[in-house]
Image: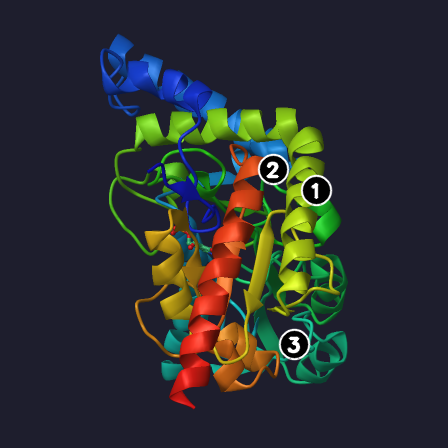
Amino acid sequence: MEHVYFDHNATTPLDEKVFEAVLPYLRGRYGNASSRHEFGTVARKAVNVAREQVAALVNVQPSQVIFVSGGTEANNLFVKGTAGYLKPTQIAVSAIEHPCVAKPAQELARQGWKLRKLAVTGDGEVDLADVDEALKEPTGIVSVMLANNETGVIQDVAAVGERVRRAKAWMHTDAVQALGKIPVDFAALNVHAMTLSAHKIYGPKGAGALVMDKRLQVRPIIHGGGHEQGLRSGTENVPAIVGFGAACELAASRLAELGPRLEKLRERLERGLHGLDAVIFGEHAPRIPNTSYFAFRGIDGETLVIELDKAGFAVTAGAACSSTSTEPSATLLAMGVEPELARGAVRFSLGAGNTPQQVDDFLRALKAVVSRLRSLTAMAV
Ligand code: PLP
């Protein structure tokens, strides 16, 4: 039986074009990008091309792109690095941030910062009135993600950024889940820094970037040979960076086609979900086109995921990329979803390779699994 992958928010398959671009750098072009000889020059040029490709996708200058190992590191670099140049005041982050923003923010709280969680509405959108409320306090750092990894809900980062600029604080967005799915323009978002990751856009694991406004002051968290403008020491992961660049170029070339195509597939899925009485989280908010997050009352999400896996479909319960815990999703709790229903949450995330047939097959399997689990629950009661 062939397994069908519907978990693209966790990670994506490496695109064939990206693979072709990376391969020479895993073989003959193995130079260290800091070396002065021909081998090094070849590697350096490849890193520079990748920097241009990443910069082009988010509309910045290449020198604003700092390569790091992925989204987690970029978020840590922003939060801890920016705090390194500020005296402790308030750090405000949305209540639905990925743990790699939420936990560094908690770390700052241990160092004397005041941590403020920004509330979200029932549809999973950051509440701008609460942002205004929070910014009445002296604030140094704000981070609000562009698209949530679980619900797919798109945040009005530009509106938050405008307020944060007025308050003279630094504004960051984690754009990991938005990149390649919707247009992402650094300047239009009103941010001082933005996090990107290669493996969510059909690139390799182990590469990402912190994109920065030139005025932002960031203290490195990894010290050494002074790579990446002194902000991220360590020999560059040239193959992964080359792949990241190629993935950005690919994303730019197919954004206009891919977004609407995935949205149609999601509509197809959600029509079926409505027929099965599913609750769809964030359904009425703007969402990235590939994501659907839903639950069935009285059915446990983990059980559903295991049964669907047996039927040949890979989806995820809660936020699998971040944790192995069985606690209900913090994002759903912040949205005011009852813990009982939140425990049922299943995330379905489409990618470039998925087809209408696969969605139909998934719905058929889901229907069978749900009615079996419902009849078991009915017997238990
Ligand atoms: N931010 C968000 C919103 C994510 O979904 C993820 C991935 O799980 C990350 C950051 C972490 O990125 P990476 O896996 O590149 O460290």
Q: Nearer the viewer, mark 1 or mark 2?
A: 2
Choose between 188 and 297: the one closer to the eye: 297
Quadrant housing residue 91: bottom right
Question: Cα distance, mark 1 to mark 2?
Answer: 9 Å
Give the left or right position of residue 158, taking residue 343 as reference: right
Question: Cα distance, mark 3 to mark 2?
Answer: 33 Å
Q: Is mark 1 within 8 Å of ligand 1?
A: no
What colouring style does the render use?
rainbow
Q: Secondary structure at mark 1?
A: helix
The disc, 1 or 3, on the residue closer to the chain's N-terminal end is: 3
Q: Position of residue 221 (x, y in %)?
A: 33, 56
Identify the mark at residue 264; answer none if there is no mark: 1
The relative height of residue 352 versus residue 340 in the rendered view (above or below) is above
Tell me whether circle 1 and circle 3 mark residues in contact (CB < 8 Å). no
Residue at the spot of label 2:
356
Task: Identify the image quadrant of the N terminus.
Answer: top left
Q: Is mark 2 within 8 Å of ligand 1?
A: no
**At label 1, which amino acid type do we have?**
Lys
The disc, 3 or 2, on the residue closer to the chain's N-terminal end is: 3
Question: Cα distance, mark 1 to mark 3?
Answer: 27 Å
Q: Secondary structure at mark 2?
A: helix
Residue in the image at 32% along x and 27% along y:
238
Task: Identify the image quadrant of the C terminus.
Answer: bottom left
Q: Position of residue 290 (x, y in %)?
A: 60, 47
Tell me whether circle 1 and circle 2 mark residues in contact (CB < 8 Å). yes
Residue in the image at 44% along x and 32% along y:
244
**At label 3, which amino acid type do we have?**
Val
Choose between 153 and 101: the one closer to the eye: 153
Residue at the spot of label 3:
120
